Amino acid sequence: MTTLTVVEAGLGTPSSTQLLATRLAEAVQRLVPDLEVRTVRLRDVARDIADNLVTGFPGARLREAVESVVGADAVIAVTPTFNASYSGLFKSFVDVLESDSLAGKPVLIAATGGTERHSLVLDHALRPLFAYLRAIAVPTGVYAASSDWGAGGLPGRVDRAAGELADLLVGRAPVTPAADQGFVPFDQLLAGR
């Protein structure tokens, strides 16, 4: 059975971060047969994370959360945006992970925030973080501002990112846009010079 672990760093219950994490997981689940989805809500292990940072020893709940992430075939990581970056709780959890524990693991990155101005958190904070961990971040990250809920564009971004993660999970080659949609492979551009 293929396993997917969703790491969700929302602080409220419910929260927009939790909602986005659920939508992303459901979209991947529709595309991957026999997918087991596990959720790690960092809010529930926040004190365990702080204790581990101070003592160096993870408690049972934190150890279980880490094992769920490390043992998964793929990860969806969703954080609220604070001060133009991921939350401190999210980063503290990542600091608990061994540096090579996500190497080669497909990861879908996502974030929520109050305004569209913080959407660069995906490419300026989350993508470099997972590159450092040598994870394979899918090309489409999903950012959801307050104005995105109920708007037309968010479901399409969720489906596209979920499709990219599903392709990696089941070993399919990613779908490339058709030439009539304006996509021209780089080698064809060079050949046309």
Image (cartoon, rainbow, N blue to C red):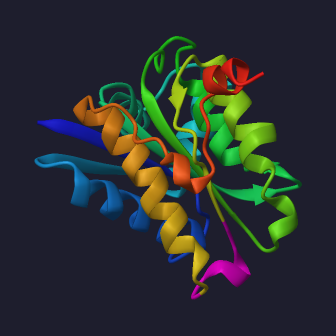
Residue 153 visible to the viewer: yes
Residue 108 vertical placement versus 69 (above, below): below
Looking at the image, which residue sits at the far top? Answer: 100
Up/down of 87 relative to 103, above or below:
below
| Magenta region, residue range | 144-150
Q: In which quadrant of the rendered image does the N terminus lie?
A: top left
What percent of the width, then of the height, locates residue 174? 40, 36
Which quadrant does the C terminus fall into?
Answer: top right
Q: Give the residue displayed 36% in from the left and 57% down from the top.
A: 25
> Residue 129, image x and y in percent?
69, 29
Who is closer to the viewer here, 47 or 142?
142
- Of residue 68 and residue 117, the one placed in the foreground of this image is 117
| Residue 138 falls inside the magenta stretch | no
Q: Image quadrant of residue 95?
A: top right
| Apparent side of residue 81 relative to residue 66 in the rendered image (left or right) | right
Out of 86 and 140, give the one closest to the viewer: 140
Residue 149 part of the magenta segment: yes
| 167 or 132, nearer to the observer | 167
Residue at 30 percent of width and 42 percent of height = 4
| Quarter of the image where one finds residue 83 | bottom right
Image vertical order of residue 125 relative to residue 146, above or below: above
Residue at image point 39% right, 33% down: 69
* Residue 21 visible in the shown view: no
